Image (tube, rainbow, N blue to C red):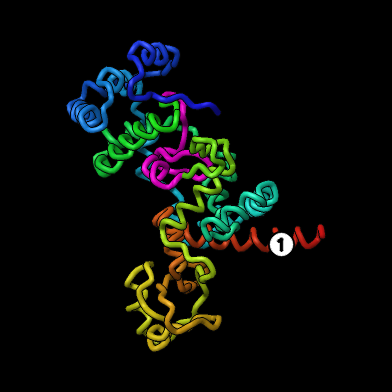
Amino acid sequence: MRLQAIKKGLSSSFLLASLLTFTTVAASNYSAQPQVQVFIDRMVNEHGFERSELINVLDKAEHREDILELMRKPAEKTKPWFEYRKIFLTQSRIDGGVSFWKENADLLKQAAEAFGVAPQIIVAIIGVETRYGGNTGRHRVLDALATLGFDYPPRSKFFTGELEQYLLLAREEDIDLLTTTGSYAGAMGYGQFIPSSYRHYAVDFDEDGKRDLWTSKADIIGSVANYFKEHGWTAGTPVAVLADVQGNDYQTVLEIGYKPNTVLDAMRHDGITPRIPLPDELLAALIAFEQENGPEYWLGFNNFYAITRYNHSPLYAMAVYQLSEEIRDAYETNRHNND
């Protein structure tokens, strides 16, 4: 996909000609709104954009009520673990992960060596996010970020910041502001990077001079791996293990949260026991996952917390981890059978 950008220094006439080739159902005249005028002023003063260019772009953005509805009611986040798990731990997603791994084995090996992140984790993230690139999003990113930035007060500051990052990203990476699609929250590519993450963590792993998270498997894989490295992933350390609890003292540890907070030696004194032998000095969090017959307890370590930096949900992190384990086992079995 050859992407086009609105770059600093492009003539307004060239930009306007490009804009006129794009047909939209209903523009929202965002540039007429006072808060948008403030945003435009900041982009002009801080980043050197042409005012006329920004007005033309933002007036092409559409207000999307369906995006607001999706933001208010993200269905999967309201599900208990035993239902949430079924969304992602499917045979088709496991098989797809094995196929993706086989097709990109050399790149995954290179990324693992460069960034210290296991191939199965990289593959599982891409599988959970977009089914290995099969569903990278149908919402125009410009519409999503404008709608959420200017028409969704609870998170307006965050999404106007992402719109700022998106405009900068487009200028840097030749991304077409008027056609590029992503999630309802403005996440893009195989790994669903929001604009700020794209700018800060995406890498040009194929060294072609551009970071392309849609068509370059090298950049896609390398960028996911780099994201984890930058968020503290530590090679060779555990992600999560099942634990048994007894008594009542474990409740105190459970209530602290899912960021590692207590060494295992202290947890044992609180009635928390990992089901496999682990060093006493390891720092962990105790997390409960709701099963049909009651809670299941897991110890989440630093690498589990690193997964939550991708999506701030223990359910998400556990789905990625368990999918990664299934993919790795299936991949190794497949490779063994073919030897």
Question: Is residue 183 shown in magenta?
Answer: yes
Q: Is residue 21 above or below residue 33?
A: above
Nearer to the camera, 256 or 132 = 132
In terms of secondary structure, where does tag 1 sit?
helix
Nearer to the camera, 116 or 272 = 116
Q: Is residue 91 left or right of residue 35?
A: right
Q: Quadrant of residue 270?
A: bottom left
**For the point 27% across and 17% down, which residue is it?**
52
The answer, for residue 83, to whether it is visible in the render is: no
Q: Quadrant of residue 284?
A: bottom left
**For the point 75% across and 58% down, which residue is it?**
334
The three-letter code of the residue at mark 1 reads Glu
Nearer to the camera, 244 or 212 = 212
Q: Counting other residues with Cα less than 10 Å from the Cα at mark 1, is it few (<14), some (14-19), or many (20 or more)? A: few
**For the point 55% across and 48% down, which residue is it?**
221
Nearer to the camera, 220 or 125 = 220
**For the point 46% across and 59% down, which residue is it?**
307
Q: Which residue corresponds to mark 1? A: 332
**Count of numbered badges drawn on the protein:** 1
Q: What's the magenta region? A: 178-202
Question: Which quadrant would the N terminus be assigned to in this image?
Answer: top right
Q: Is residue 184 above or below residue 40?
A: below
Residue 70 percent across, percent down from the top left: 40, 40
Residue 273 percent across, percent down from the top left: 47, 83
Q: Is residue 106 above or below residue 144?
A: below
Residue 186 percent across, percent down from the top left: 40, 38
Question: Which quadrant would the C terminus be assigned to in this image?
Answer: bottom right
Residue 202 percent across, percent down from the top left: 46, 44
Question: Is residue 192 shown in magenta?
Answer: yes
Magenta stretch prevailing secondary structure: loop
Q: Is residue 274 left or right of residue 102?
A: left
